[in-house]
Image (tube, grey):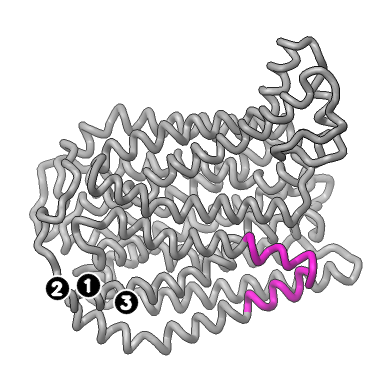
């Protein structure tokens, strides 16, 4: 298929399924990258809180939630740095290749809590693995407990800690290089007036959710059946597939790599235009951050509550807790293609809702989800566990809200950001929404030990519903501001 017209088509040669084949490659790479990410994240809090004899670190819930919050916060905060490096120095293609390589290394290093003690045992002839499994103090510290006095035991403890935190550092650094850059590469494949861009971003988001679904089902089962390190290793395999696809098909399907942008590549917008667009992006980020504080509970307080406070039995089968994160993705799979088609249909006819209206709907659904978790935890506080259906329905509801908000966010940031700073702008938006939201979710989650799950979920529900009302109240102001800045809050420019 030849290149289509500028007004209606893509900017690269060839197409698959009605979209540029480069877009199909980006979607495939993102699927495997997110499979690896969620394979690790879906079991991280459970691994940290699992007893040492079960292969975990034996941390308290508060400590585990704090680390998960810091980790997720950095994963979405540092893409602003990676985006700057990609825009100005490395170029998008090289940044993605470097980032993917770092993430492959990081995921495989997550198996060091098992591998390192075994290596020490081989070289010292000791049994440090058993010593660590029966240790009363938590693993993962920087000072070996006094109980580790045997041959090689202190060294084994330090190697476990070092390998674990080096793995997290590699994952954070690699993600910083990939996260915002891959989104921009996808957007560059379409002309400004191509209505398929919004649909492509919807399928991009679908790939994230499918990856999360497969990850939650596979890694949760593998980790509980064979051990935590097998779940982490599975994540490394997924990331290796993403890197292989990108290196093999990138040049052919995406076309020649572009040089890093410089400020002279694009005409400088006026200060008035920049100020107006930055104000709009800041308002969008504030609204989405509130949504993300609630959504990130899925890998923190929700998971811990579901593990201990929900009756997950269906006959003789007990639903693994990580499957609830998979349910989030399972909801997205059938809904996203319908939504992508709807957005394109409405965009062509200029009848699509703007992003403020979509955010308000997403926040409303997020608040309803949190209210249902409050209801479930209230039932559990009476001495009986909540039925598994209530949190399951809650996750489905917030997943729909997530689709509505995020499938529109990518295109909005792409349109509003300066052309030569799109990667760093996307990185900044990630930092202000998922980065800050993920960090606050972990930090606020510590309050569950003090006030209980019910009060905690009620407070988050109230804040999220108020944000939905605020979005509608601010909409007329932001629409006028966008018009003055020569921007559009709808899908096509």
Quadrant where the image shows the C terminus? bottom left
Residue 456 is one of the magenta-drawn residues: yes
* Front residue of this view, candidates 330 and 12: 12
CB contact under 8 Å: marks 3 and 2? no
Quadrant where the image shows the N terminus? top left
Range covered by the magenta-colored residues? 442-461
Q: Secondary structure at mark 2?
A: loop
**Displayed quadrant of residue 391:** bottom right
Disc 1 target residue = 274
Q: Secondary structure at mark 3?
A: helix
Residue 411 is one of the magenta-drawn residues: no
Check the image and report above or below for 218 versus 345: above
Check the image and report above or below for 11 versus 472: above
Residue at position x 65%, y 30% from top? 230
CB contact under 8 Å: marks 1 and 2? yes
Nearest to N terminus: mark 1 or mark 3: 1
Side of 267 relative to 211 (left or right): left
Nearest to N terminus: mark 3 or mark 2: 2
Disc 3 target residue = 279
């Amino acid at each position: 298929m030849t290149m289509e017209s500028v007004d209606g088509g893509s900017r690269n040669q060839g197409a698959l399924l009605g979209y540029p084949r480069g877009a199909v490659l980006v979607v495939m790479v993102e699927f495997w990258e997110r499979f690896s990410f969620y394979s690790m994240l879906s079991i991280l809090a459970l691994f940290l809180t699992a007893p040492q004899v079960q292969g975990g670190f034996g941390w308290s819930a508060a400590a585990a939630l704090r680390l998960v919050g810091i980790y997720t916060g950095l994963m979405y905060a540092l893409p602003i740095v990676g985006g700057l490096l990609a825009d100005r120095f490395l170029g998008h293609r090289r940044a993605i290749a470097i980032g993917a390589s770092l993430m492959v290394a990081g995921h495989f290093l997550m198996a060091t809590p098992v591998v390192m003690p075994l290596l020490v045992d081989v070289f010292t002839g000791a049994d440090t693995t058993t010593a660590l499994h029966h240790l009363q103090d938590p693993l993962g510290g920087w000072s070996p407990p006094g109980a580790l006095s045997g041959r090689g035991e202190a060294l084994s403890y330090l190697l476990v800690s070092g390998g674990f935190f080096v793995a997290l550092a590699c994952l954070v650094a690699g993600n910083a290089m990939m996260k915002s850059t891959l989104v921009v590469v996808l957007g560059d494949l379409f002309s400004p007036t191509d209505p398929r861009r919004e649909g492509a971003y919807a399928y991009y988001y679908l790939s994230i959710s499918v990856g999360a679904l497969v990850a939650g089902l596979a890694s949760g089962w593998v980790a509980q059946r064979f051990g935590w390190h097998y779940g982490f290793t599975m994540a490394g395999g997924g990331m290796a597939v993403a890197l292989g696809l990108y290196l093999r098909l990138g040049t052919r399907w995406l076309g020649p790599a572009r040089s890093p942008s410089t400020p002279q590549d694009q005409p400088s917008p006026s200060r008035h235009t920049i100020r107006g667009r930055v104000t709009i992006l800041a308002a969008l980020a504030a609204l989405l951050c509130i949504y993300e504080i609630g959504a990130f509970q899925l890998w923190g307080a929700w998971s811990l509550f579901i593990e201990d406070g929900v009756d997950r039995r269906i006959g003789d089968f007990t639903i693994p807790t990580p499957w609830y994160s998979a349910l989030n993705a399972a909801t997205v799979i059938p809904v996203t293609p319908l939504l992508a088609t709807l957005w394109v249909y409405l965009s062509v006819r200029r009848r699509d809702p703007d992003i403020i209206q979509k955010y308000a709907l997403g926040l409303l659904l997020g608040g309803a989800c949190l209210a249902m978790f409050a209801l479930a935890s209230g039932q559990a506080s009476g001495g009986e566990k909540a039925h598994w259906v209530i949190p399951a329905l809650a996750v489905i509801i917030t997943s729909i809200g997530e689709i509505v908000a995020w499938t529109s966010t990518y295109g909005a940031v792409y349109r509003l950001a300066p052309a030569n700073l799109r990667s760093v702008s996307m990185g900044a938006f990630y930092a202000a929404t998922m980065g800050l939201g993920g960090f606050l979710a972990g930090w606020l989650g510590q309050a569950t030990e003090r006030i209980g799950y019910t009060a905690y979920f009620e407070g988050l529900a109230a804040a999220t519903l108020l944000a939905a009302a605020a979005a509608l109240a601010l909409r007329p102001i932001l629409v006028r501001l966008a018009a003055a800045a020569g921007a559009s809050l709808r899908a096509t420019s």
